């Protein structure tokens, strides 16, 4: 996001800044993403209400992998927080370690999600419902919601990887926090989003 | 700001003069160039959309004529010179898509937001010039994909610009629902990405990158309009993306989000159960209604600026104008149900949506009255830009008033999907917005290209287009009241509609006249880019900041320091000044109406600078580190 | 500079524009010919070729005139302005007067149209609630037309009155809270009135129960409508999209022999398709032999079609398509089997239903049309009854109204003996969308009874349908509930 074109930014008179415009961009993109998930979940609620009334909505328990991934998301958010604080305090070594842990947990999260889908497909709830199955649309919704969250996580992994490389180059420190702050914000957003989605899917089965 | 920094800025700005052709003209990150790219692409798409409308107008006016020349151009779509019914649907669909999204969303808002937000706010460029460039190229790609759909065998999407499933979801339901529909969805997905990237940039720039003294209540109304437009887009386009994604899944993977209980000719009973086609309509119109204002509000913003400048009067009721824009924006999110009164929705909800919809008329009325009062006792200069702005106000009145009929659930029963609707939205969001766009082009052409467009041609362009547009769309009200449904390929199967044939012919002739008038515009536009009269730095004696930049474009906009702003943008014809304008950046003691002294900003100052790192050198230095080189 | 620009550009402009015009308009006259044998669009009777020609020539002349004027103004105007330094044309004046002319001419046009097509605007309503809609319309029209006239007149009058004059300064007038409040409050009051009135009208139309309403089912499909009357028992038989067979059971009614026959056909189809799937390689060979005997030059499209079919077989598209069809038919068979034993579905109520290709209504009798769609969304639009409702697959919708005028009455009133009520489709639904209509006849009770008597029952009571051998009903896992006819699905509609 910030690799090219830094010049006009520096030319800007400093007095006008309220927030770093690029960090603000991230917040706006988060708003857009929230709207996307709002659309998904409101469609889900409408369909569910309708499906339950017509007996066209299969109710099933979330795979246990999703619970694990929920824990993973929480822990990795914690490490992200630590990494950010380390960077703020110029503790570069810790910063690197925490970032790496966060990244690894992120990858674990992805694997858990994947195995969750594998499990669902195996018990007969694939994305495209079997033709003779009525009400498999509930599973379709689950896949849409979780896969799009997954895509967000992948984006976050790239950001984390990028931060880690910067950190290895000793370019993440108290005076150069933009990237890690953006990563931090985004990663927490992705984590919170998953908590919300998990609770949503759990309670509105 | 220290003098050293100012010098640095100066030097930096000059550095950018030596750019390669590709960096300067193609993958440019300069907002002024991107704005020109948006404009030219928008104009090209507009020409395509206009030609399509003339094609289907020919069909409506002379349904039993053979136009041999059509077969020459369109081949199998016009066998024997008669337009194919499927192709007619495709034309209607793509005309709508192009005009709504490509011309009036990207072409209008993309062009002028890009041009004016940094210039009028006093910023060197957008918050992220790189994302801005991506925004244009996604838009370009999207246009290419949409045009490509004309060359696929089954033809482009033809389920109407709203592409309601199941018609659009079932490949066998009509030829246009084949590969052409897939391309349409891909094009729209790309378009949404472009709109979002653009939108976040606009919002961030307006909020965070205004120059010293440019408080929010000194922003020109154009910026306010673009700002609200961008917010609307940010909140509504993702929902359309969601709707499109579900549709893509239904089409390509076999899910049943929108499909249930269908028996299709040639296929038989489908296995899909449990979906709901109405869900799509809810999602679509949740975007669709704000989209109307995404189209219209930039045009209203441009009009406010142009009318104030050319009436040589402050815009009347600045605060009321901003509040009404805000009101329209907020309300636009909770009125989508008025597109769905007759889908079998709960009647109680119908009345709620009716109430909310009619409330929108109040801020709209405020805007109209404020425009009128701005003209009152003005000293009106008839530039083409001014005439087009007046045209917008006229269309906004005529088209807006018919919205009061359609927003009324009881009246909508009879008028829904009739020509009355066609007349309504073509006036209020089609003609009005395109007039706003023309107004903006005539007004800011000197800023974009450093030359003036020819006024005389502009007058002809205006009057021909204005009269033709009324001739085209006004009679459609009467057709709609008589119960003529829209999107009909021919009316000949319903004998009672034969009386409308001559009206249809009148409309078509007027449409061709309008098309002809656009040739004058195109000529004027492209000729003036190269040969137009050279413009001075402030040809309209305007107050806003963009006219304080040099005529010749430079990267960074101002050669020296960015000017400080001392007052609001509409200080025209002040009694205490000899000149009838008072630019925002000219220092002066008094601050104009309603605006306080320049505020000293005490917001936190960001010291960090984005390191100039490219993927390549990051990788390289990471390697160096791993291999044991010293890190610094 | 200016002179040079228009010296040659004017001429070039003329050339370009005429080229454009010729290419768009020339076919009207040069290539145009009446189309006597068009099977797609029956030619409207009133239309004659000379109208088009006339319009065409008039248009050409007009365009030429405009062009000449433009060129003249450019050349003379620009050149003399350059030479003398005086304004030849005062564009401020011209534009100011043009706006007045536009205002007058536009008003005249609207007035002319109101008189000329006045009869067709809001044609006489032929339903009970139609009058209340028209009443609502007239109130709205009154208010909006007044606003329209006032604002448009002010707009163009201000343009004229306050046009630029040298030495005059505009008023520095930017704010007046009182005025703002006035024009916020007045529209708000007017709109409150309209909303309240609209609400009561809407409520009356959609939420007033009509206990005496007779039900008629209207079934929309690509591209046409069918109506179903409940018959003597006054009860509609169940229906299901899985039962649809265009030849024998267009509406998918629950008539056991027909449905069993459909099931058997489907099973036979499945078998045949399975055979095809197994014999794809030999099919490919036959086609290859066939192709060898043909040539591209002689057979053209047939040759390329055959080539494409072979390609589909080779790359597996054909096989996957066949598998899909087999699967789909299998599902349908399962669903049919799951319902076959249900007494709720096959309750014989459908036997005396009557499916008609015209809708006949009795004047003064309230009716509820219940709408069902077969394939895509349609919209049942009856402008004279001021009635419209979307017809959505998988969701039953309805509209209640009372016809108050017979067809005969309307014909007399409109002095048009050809007049008929129609229900037509208003929601885009495919290529023949414009051709989707069903005639509605409103008549007296006696006439109606005579007509309905003549309509055939779905199952003829005298000659019952030949009993079909009891089928070996399979047990299936499919949920029987899906296969039964679902009533109005309220939740989704009400959820929002």
Image (cartoon, rainbow, N blue to C red):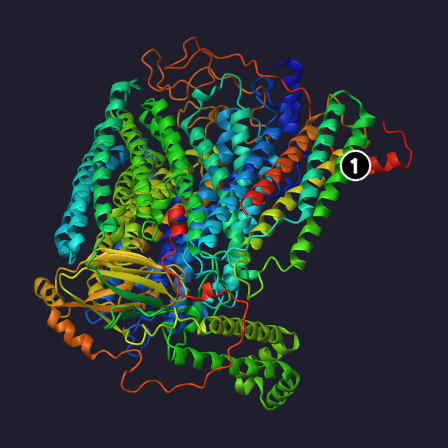
Count of labels in the image? 1
- Along the line of sight, the residue nearer the viewer: B129 or C496: C496
- Along the line of sight, the residue nearer the viewer: B173 or A73: A73
**Location of residue C192 with respect to B568 vertically, above or below:** below
* Residue situated furthest right in the rendering: B628
Which quadrant of the figure has residue B336? top left
**Residue at x-position 62% and y-position 44%:** A149
Quarter holding the C terminus of chain B?
top right
Residue B3 image offset from top left, x and y in percent: 64, 13
- Along the line of sight, the residue nearer the viewer: B460 or A144: A144
Q: Is residue B93 left or right of residue B356?
A: right
Residue C62 in sight here: yes
Residue C447 image offset from top left, x and y in percent: 12, 73
* Residue situated furthest top in the rendering: B589
Q: Is residue B312 left or right of residue C308?
A: left
Residue A188 image offset from top left, x and y in percent: 65, 33
**Residue at x-position 64% and y-position 32%:** B17
Mark 1, other Cα within 10 Å: few <14 / some 14–19 / many ≥20: few
Residue C338 image offset from top left, x and y in percent: 49, 71
Residue B143 in sight here: no
Q: Label 1: which residue? A: B617
Q: Is residue B130 left or right of residue B410?
A: right
* Residue situated furthest bottom in the rendering: C293
């Amino acid at each position: 996001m910030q690799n090219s074109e830094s010049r006009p930014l520096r030319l800007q008179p400093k007095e006008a800044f309220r927030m770093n415009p690029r960090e603000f961009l991230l917040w706006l993109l988060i708003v857009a993403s929230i709207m996307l998930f709002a659309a998904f979940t409101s469609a889900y609620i409408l369909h569910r209400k309708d499906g339950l009334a017509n007996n066209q909505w299969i109710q099933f328990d979330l795979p246990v992998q999703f619970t694990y991934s929920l824990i993973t998301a929480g822990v990795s958010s914690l490490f992200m927080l630590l990494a950010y604080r380390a960077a703020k305090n110029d503790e570069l070594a810790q910063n690197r370690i925490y970032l790496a842990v966060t990244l690894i947990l992120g990858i674990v999260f992805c694997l858990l999600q994947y195995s969750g889908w594998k499990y669902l497909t195996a018990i007969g709830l694939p994305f495209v419902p079997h033709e003779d199955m009525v009400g498999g649309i509930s599973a379709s919704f689950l896949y849409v919601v979780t896969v799009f969250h997954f895509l967000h996580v992948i984006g976050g992994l790239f950001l984390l990887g990028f931060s880690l490389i910067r950190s290895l180059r000793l370019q993440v420190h108290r005076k150069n926090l933009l990237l890690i702050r953006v990563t931090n914000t985004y990663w927490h957003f992705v984590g919170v989003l998953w908590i919300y989605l998990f609770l949503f899917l759990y309670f509105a089965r | 700001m220290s003098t050293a920094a100012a010098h640095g800025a100066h030097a930096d700005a000059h550095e950018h003069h030596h750019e390669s052709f590709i960096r300067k003209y193609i993958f440019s990150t300069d907002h002024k160039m991107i704005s020109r790219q948006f404009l030219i692409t928008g104009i090209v798409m507009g020409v395509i959309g206009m030609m399509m409308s003339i094609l289907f107008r020919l069909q409506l006016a002379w349904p039993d004529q053979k136009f041999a020349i059509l077969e020459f151009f369109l081949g199998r779509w016009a066998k024997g010179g008669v337009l194919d019914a499927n192709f007619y649907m495709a034309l209607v669909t793509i005309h709508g898509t192009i005009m709504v999204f490509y011309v009036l969303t990207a072409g209008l808002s993309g062009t002028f937001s890009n041009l004016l937000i940094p210039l009028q706010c006093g910023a060197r460029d957008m918050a992220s010039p790189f994302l801005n460039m991506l925004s244009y190229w996604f838009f370009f790609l999207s246009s290419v994909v949409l045009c490509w759909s004309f060359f696929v065998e089954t033809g482009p999407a033809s389920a109407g610009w709203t592409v309601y499933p199941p018609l659009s979801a079932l490949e066998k339901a009509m030829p246009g629902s084949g590969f052409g529909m897939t391309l349409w969805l891909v094009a729209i997905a790309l378009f949404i990405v472009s709109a979002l990237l653009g939108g976040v940039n606009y919002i961030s720039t307006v909020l965070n990158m205004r120059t010293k003294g440019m408080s929010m209540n000194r922003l020109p109304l154009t910026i306010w309009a673009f700002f609200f437009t961008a917010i609307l887009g940010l909140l509504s386009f993702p929902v359309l993306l969601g709707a499109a994604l579900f549709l893509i899944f239904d089409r390509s993977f076999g899910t049943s989000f929108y499909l249930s209980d269908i028996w299709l000719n040639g296929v038989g009973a489908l296995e899909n159960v449990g979906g709901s086609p109405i869900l799509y309509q809810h999602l679509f119109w949740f975007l669709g209604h704000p989209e109307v204002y995404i189209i219209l509000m930039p045009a209203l913003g441009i009009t406010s600026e142009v009318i104030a400048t050319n009436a040589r009067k402050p815009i009347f009721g600045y605060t009321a104008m901003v509040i009404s824009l805000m009101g329209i924006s907020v309300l636009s999110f909770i009125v989508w149900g008025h597109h769905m009164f007759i889908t079998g929705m709960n009647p109680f909800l119908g009345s709620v949506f009716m109430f909310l919809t009619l409330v929108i008329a109040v801020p709209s009325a405020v805007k109209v009255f404020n425009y009128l009062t701005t003209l009152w006792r003005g000293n009106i200069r008839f530039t083409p830009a001014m005439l087009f702005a007046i045209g917008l106000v006229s269309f906004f009145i005529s088209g807006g008033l018919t919205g009061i009929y359609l927003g009324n659930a009881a009246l909508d029963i009879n008028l829904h999907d009739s020509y009355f609707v066609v007349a309504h939205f073509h006036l209020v969001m089609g003609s009005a917005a395109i007039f706003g766009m023309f107004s903006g082009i005539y007004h800011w052409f000197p800023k974009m290209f450093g030359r003036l467009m020819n006024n005389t041609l502009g007058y002809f362009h205006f009057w021909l287009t204005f009269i033709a547009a009324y001739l085209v769309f006004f009679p459609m009200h009467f057709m709609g009241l008589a119960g003529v449904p829209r999107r009909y390929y021919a009316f000949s199967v319903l004998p009672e509609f034969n009386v409308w044939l001559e009206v249809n012919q009148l409309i078509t002739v007027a449409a061709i006249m309008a098309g002809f008038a656009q040739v004058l515009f195109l000529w004027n536009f492209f000729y003036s880019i190269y040969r137009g009269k050279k413009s001075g730095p402030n040809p309209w004696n305007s107050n806003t900041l963009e006219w304080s930049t040099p005529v010749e474009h430079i990267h960074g906009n101002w050669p020296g320091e960015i000017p400080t702003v001392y007052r609001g943008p509409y200080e025209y014809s002040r009694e205490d000044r000899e000149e009838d304008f008072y630019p925002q950046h000219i220092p002066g003691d008094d601050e104009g109406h309603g605006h306080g002294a320049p505020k000293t900003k005490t917001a936190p100052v960001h010291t960090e600078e984005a390191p100039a790192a490219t993927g390549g050198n990051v990788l390289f230095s990471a390697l160096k580190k791993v291999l044991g080189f010293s890190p610094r | 500079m200016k002179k040079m620009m228009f010296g040659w550009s004017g001429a070039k402009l003329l050339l370009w524009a005429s080229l454009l015009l010729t290419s768009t308009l020339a076919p009207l006259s040069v290539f145009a010919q009446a189309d006597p044998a068009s099977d797609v669009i029956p030619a409207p009777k009133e239309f004659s070729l000379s109208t088009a020609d006339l319009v065409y020539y008039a248009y050409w002349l007009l365009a030429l005139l405009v062009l000449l004027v433009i060129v003249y103004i450019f050349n003379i105007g620009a050149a003399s302005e350059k030479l003398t330094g005086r304004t030849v044309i005062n564009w401020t004046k011209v534009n100011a007067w043009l706006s007045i002319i536009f205002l007058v001419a536009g008003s005249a046009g609207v007035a002319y149209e109101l008189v000329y097509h006045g009869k067709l605007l809001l044609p006489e309503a032929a339903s009970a609630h139609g009058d209340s809609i028209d009443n609502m319309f007239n109130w709205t029209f009154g208010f909006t037309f007044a606003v329209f006239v006032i604002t448009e007149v002010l707009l163009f009058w201000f343009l004229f009155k306050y046009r630029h004059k040298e030495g005059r300064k505009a008023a520095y007038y930017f704010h007046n809270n009182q005025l703002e409040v006035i024009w916020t409050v007045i529209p708000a009051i007017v709109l409150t009135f309209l909303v309240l009135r609209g609400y009561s009208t809407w409520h009356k139309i959609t939420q007033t129960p009509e206990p005496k309403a007779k039900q008629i089912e209207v079934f929309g499909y690509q591209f046409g409508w069918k109506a179903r009357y409940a018959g003597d028992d006054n009860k509609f038989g169940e229906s299901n999209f899985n039962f649809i067979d265009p030849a024998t059971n267009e509406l998918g009614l629950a008539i056991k022999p027909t449905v069993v026959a459909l099931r058997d056909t489907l099973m036979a189809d499945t078998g045949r398709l399975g055979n095809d799937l197994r014999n794809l390689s030999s099919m490919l060979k036959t086609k290859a032999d066939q192709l060898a005997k043909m040539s591209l030059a002689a057979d053209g499209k047939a040759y390329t079609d055959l080539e494409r079919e072979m390609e589909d077989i080779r790359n597996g598209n054909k096989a996957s398509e066949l598998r899909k069809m087999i699967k789909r038919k299998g599902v349908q068979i399962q669903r049919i089997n799951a319902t076959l034993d249900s007494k709720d579905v096959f309750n014989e109520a459908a036997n005396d239903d009557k499916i008609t290709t015209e809708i006949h209504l009795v004047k003064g009798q309230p009716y509820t049309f219940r709408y069902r769609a077969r394939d895509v969304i349609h919209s049942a639009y009856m402008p004279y009854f001021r009635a419209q409702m979307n017809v959505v697959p998988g969701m039953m919708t309805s509209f209640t109204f009372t016809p108050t005028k017979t067809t005969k009455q309307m014909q007399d009133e409109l002095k048009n003996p050809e007049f008929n009520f129609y229900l037509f489709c208003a929601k885009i639904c495919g290529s023949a969308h414009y051709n989707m209509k069903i005639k509605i006849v409103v008549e007296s009770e006696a006439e109606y009874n005579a007509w309905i008597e003549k309509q055939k029952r779905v199952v003829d009571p005298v000659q019952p349908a030949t009993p079909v051998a009891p089928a070996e009903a399979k047990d299936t896992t499919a949920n029987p509930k899906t296969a039964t006819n679902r009533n109005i699905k309220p939740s989704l509609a009400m959820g929002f």
